[in-house]
Amino acid sequence: MSMSDAVDYLLNIPTTQPSPPVNGYNTPTNIDPDISVGDTWINGPENNDFSAQRRNSLYAWSMEQILSPDRHIREKMTFFFHNHFATETETIGSPIIAYNHHKMLRENCLGNFKDMVKLVTLDVGMLIYLNGYLNTKTAPDENYARELLELFTLGKSPESQYTEDDVKAAARVLTGWRINITNYTSFFSSVVHDTNNKTFSAFFNNTTINGQSGNNGALETDDLINMIFSKEDVVARYIVRKLYRYFVYYVIDTNIENNVIIPLANDFKQNWEIKPLLEALLKSEHFYDSNNIGCYIKNPLDVYSTFIKQFKVQFPTSNVEDKFSAYYTIWIASYISGLFWGNPPNVSGWPAYYQTPQYYQLWLNSDTLPKRIMYTVYLMVGFQYKGTNTLVADIIGFAQECSDPSDPNKLIQESINQMFSMDISATQKQGLKESTLLFGQTSDYYWTNAWNDYMNDPNDTGKKNIVLTGLIYMYKYLLDLAENQLA
C-alpha cells in the first residue's frame, strides 16, 4: 500500500465490538456456580467469590483483542485512553463495571473527544475510582474535578491557569451523580446536588454556572464541560502533545510546538474529532522524518504483540479454557515486565508517558529488560501455559516470507527490515551470520545447503532441526539487540 492508503486502512476500525469475555477460568476445584463455561459473565449476577477470576478473564480477553492478527489502530487507541483516563480495575472491583468502562473507551477511541469527556465523567467505573459517587452538597469531593482539569482536559502547562477555587467550584457542579448498582448505570440525584451558583476564575472569564434544581441540576455538568472546552487552545494543544508523545517522541521543542503541535491543535479544536487528528499526524512529513525513527522505546505489550503478530504465534480458538490460559499468560508476562494492564499505577497513568525527563526510558531497567528478552525467547522455543500446552512462533514460516531464504544475507537483511525500525551495522550482520546461520563457518553455502536440503525433504526431522536451530539462534541474536526495543 501507499503510505496514505496504509494509514486509511489502519484508521478504518471495525464498527462492531468484539464479543464479550466468557467463563474460561473454571478449575476442577473452583467452579463458578452462576456462569457456565463458555458463557459471558457481563450480564450475570455479581459474585464476590469469583470477582478475581472474572477480572482475570477481562485481562485475558483484552490481550486477545490486542494480539488479534487484525491490523487496525483500535486497540492502540483504546490503550491510549486507558492511560489518559486512567482507572485501576482492581480498585473498581466489579469486573462488570470495569468491562463496561473499557468497552466505552474502545467504542469511542476514534470518536469525538469532547463527547468522550462527558461519557467518562458519568462512567460508573470512573465515579467509583475517583469518588464521584460520594460527591454531595454537604461533603464535596474534589477528586474527579481536580483530575478533570489537571489530567483529562487542560493539563498542567504554564498556559493552564485554573485555580484551586476552580477545582472546588467544579466539584460542586458535579455533585449529585450516583450509581445504580443493579444495572451498572449512573443517574442524577437532585437531593444531594448543590443548587447554588458556581463562579470561576478569570482564567475562565469569571464564568458563573447558575445553580439548577431538580433534574435540571444534571445540565450543569454540560455547562462545566462547555466552559472547559471554551479554553480550546489549551485543551487542544494538551491532547495533541499527549498523542505526539504516544506516537512520535517525548521531546517537544519550540520548533515542534510551533510547526506541528499548534497547527494540529488548530484543526482539532474545530470539532474535537480524534480520527482526522490522527490521520493528519500519521500522514505528516514530520512523522516520517528520520530523526523520529527508532527513538520510541516500546512498552512491554508493544514488544510481545509485535513479535506474536510477525511470527504468527497461534493461540487456541475453540477451547475457551485454553484460550483464557494462553492469553492470560501474555498478560502475566506484560505485568512482570512492568506493564500491569488494566491497572496503571495512579490516575496519571504510566510514568513512561508523562514523567520528565525519562519518559519511555522508564520501561527499561536491569529487571524488566532481561524479562522482555526472556519472554520473547520463550515464544520462539515454546511458552508453556496450562500444563504442557505451548505458544510457539512459526520461525520457519517467518523465514520463508523472505524473497530468498537460502541466501543468508537476504534472510538477515529482510528479517531486520521486518523486525526493526532501523538497520544494524555491516559488522554486526557479518558476525550474526557467521555465529548463527553459518554455524561458525565463513562461507554462505553452509546455510544455503542446509536450507535447500530441508526444502527438498521437509519431513526429515534432522534436516529441519538444523535449519530451525540456526534460525532460532539468529532471531535470538536480533531479539537481544537494543534495536528490538525501539520503534
Image (cartoon, grey):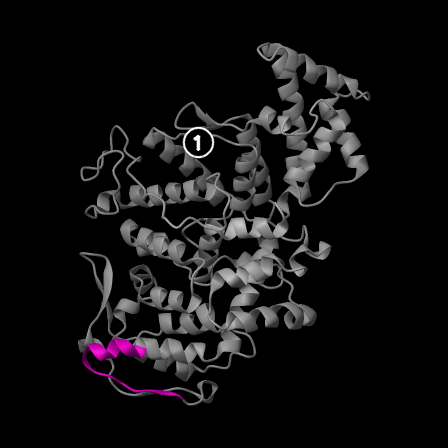
Give percent across and percent down for residue 294.
67, 50
Q: Name the one closer to the observer, 15 or 52.
A: 15
Give percent across and percent down for residue 288.
67, 55
Q: Residue at x 79, y 21 (%)?
A: 444
Q: Which residue is drawn at 81% across and 20% down?
A: 443
The image quarter in which residue 250 lies: bottom right
SS for callout 1: loop
Q: Can you say whether 183 is above or below 392 in the image?
A: below
For badge 1, the amino acid type reads Phe
The stretch drawn in magenta includes residue 285: no
The stretch drawn in magenta includes residue 210: yes
Q: Can you say whether 137 is above or below 335 in the image?
A: below
Q: Name the one closer to the observer, 131 or 176.
A: 176
Q: Can residue 367 be seen in this view?
A: no
Q: Which residue is drawn at 18% across and 37% down?
A: 33
- In the image, taking residue 324 as reference, residue 205 lies left or right, namely right
Give percent across and percent down for residue 403.
69, 29
Q: Name the one closer to the observer, 438 or 287.
A: 287
- What is the crowding at mark 1: few (fewer than 14 residues within 10 Å), some, or many (at least 20)? some
Give percent across and percent down for residue 137.
24, 79
- In the image, taking residue 392 as reference, residue 29 lies left or right, namely left
Question: Looking at the figure, which quarter contains the N terminus?
Answer: top right
The segment highlighted magenta reads: 207-220
Q: Can residue 321 be seen in this view?
A: yes
Q: Can you say whether 1 is above or below 361 in the image?
A: above
Q: Residue at x 27, y 50 (%)?
A: 96
How many numbered marks does the figure carry? 1
Q: Can you say whether 46 is above or below 286 in the image?
A: above
Determine which residue is flagged by label 1: 315
